[in-house]
Image (spheres, grey):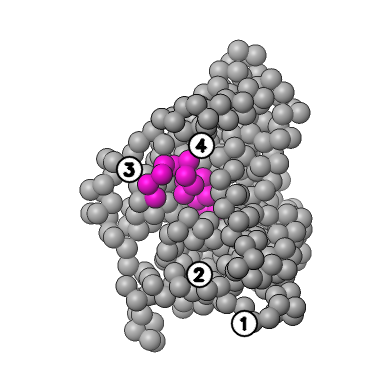
Amino acid sequence: MDAQGRQIVERGPGFAASLGDLAGAINIKTGSAGLVAAIFGCSGPALIVIGAAGTGNLTNGQTVAWLLAIYGLGGLISLVLGLYYKMPITGAYSIPGAALVAGSLATFGFDQAVGAFIMAGVLVLILGVTGLIGKVMRWLPLPIVMAMIAGALIRFGIGAVTAVGKMPLVVGLTILAFFLSMRFVKVVPPVLTALIVGLLAVWATGSFGTGDAAISFVRPQLTAPSFTFGAFLAIAVPLAILVVGAENAQATGVLIAEKYNPPINAMTIISGIGGILAGFLGGHNANIAGPMTAICSSDQAGEDRSLRYGATVINGVLFAVFGIFAGLVVPLILKMPAALIGAIAGLAMINVLLMAFQAAFNKQSGYQIGAFVALIISMSNVSLFGISAPFWALVGGAVISLLVEEGAVVSTTAEANLAEREAA
């Protein structure tokens, strides 16, 4: 408990309650949402990590250890939080963080990077244990958070459109199948129909890749950490901010939009623990995932919100399996067309984006100028001082609201959710 006697880690229904309802939570809708989230997380993002490993001249064993750390522990986070809180709180890792590390490995040795990974996890853990992250989330206006979510996720929707130009027949049939299924087939989630049709189209057109993956199945190789002040400033601090200000903030905003009361402190604490453990294994961070949480918490995972945690459980199992067998699975992922993966991810985001825009630009909620600023900053994908756009979107939106919009910058909806949970 903190100084006021409040629980540092929020209470949830517990594992027994979730396991008792798990049979009903595992169905075709949660299964398809969990599968799509896993395919998204294990495809393009995995290639970012593999590319970063190449930049740092890592051995095959170090690369496999990196993938094992972030996917294995990310899957474990999904299982722990999804089952304890009975919510679709999905774990993975920071995709922008992987890009940040890729640039840093040109300057720092991997042993220094590993030390920075561990220090980043410690920073995130401190934010969660002290409860500071909860105070920050209470202070931020909900419209600004939702605008940041919309700006960060809009690229997935745009990606579905640009994918048509890359593979017109395959992606066109995939998108058509999605909307026809939405209109005429009520028992099967549209995103699952789209995935099946897309894979059939890829098979029929012979569009599966034939190239070999850059790594093969080898034993993970651990790297002893080296702690330096330079790596702390260049890697640890920006990575910690990315985890809290981008991934956790996105996931929190999405869950609030879906009418959940997310356990903000617990999400931050487990992201810190995940970062420390992943660092010792040679991975940059295992934490709550914004995009995967968005997919698993959307209505694509079923109308009953109390059962959507089943999508997170399925996603967690698939992530863990991917991490364990990364050396064998990556070659298969490399054979799937990137355009198809992008199209499916974009289609899965439609309802999430709609809700984010509606919450961000509802006149009754106020903060419209701040929300607009947050939206365009988040969409810009700008990076300053090694920190990516979602963080600056929150800062910029809140500052502009303070300057030009009347009233204290307080999110009444988020504050009500937090107060309700703390009272419980």
Q: Are marks 2 and 1 in contact (CB under 8 Å)?
A: no
Instruction: Classify mark 2: helix, strand or loop.
Output: helix
x, y percent for residue 79: 37, 50
Residue at figure coordinates x 56%, y 26% from the top left: 180
- Label 2 vs 4, first from the N-terminus: 4
Q: Are marks 3 and 4 in contact (CB under 8 Å)?
A: no
Q: Are marks 3 and 2 in contact (CB under 8 Å)?
A: no
Question: Crowdedness of circle 2 by 10 Å Cα count: few (<14), some, many (20+)?
Answer: many
Residue at figure coordinates x 32%, y 63% from the top left: 12
Side of 31 relative to 66 (left or right): left
- Which quadrant would residue 197 be assigned to in this image? top right
Name the residue at the bottom extreme: 3
- Label 2 vs 1, first from the N-terminus: 1
Identify residue type, mark 3.
Ala
Identify residue type, mark 2.
Ala
Identify residue type, mark 1.
Ala
Residue, disc 4: 36
The numbered dot on residue 408 is 1
- Which quadrant would residue 351 be assigned to in this image? top right
Q: Is residue 57 magenta?
A: no
The numbered dot on residue 25 is 3
Stretch in magenta: 283-305
Name the residue at the front extreme: 364
| Front of the two marks 3 and 1 | 1
The numbered dot on residue 420 is none
Residue at figure coordinates x 41%, y 36% from the top left: 29
Q: Nearer the viewer, residue 320 or 226?
A: 320
Residue, disc 2: 414
Q: Nearer the viewer, residue 389 or 239?
A: 389
Q: Nearer the viewer, residue 140 or 81?
A: 140
**Spatial CA span between label 2 and label 1:** 14 Å
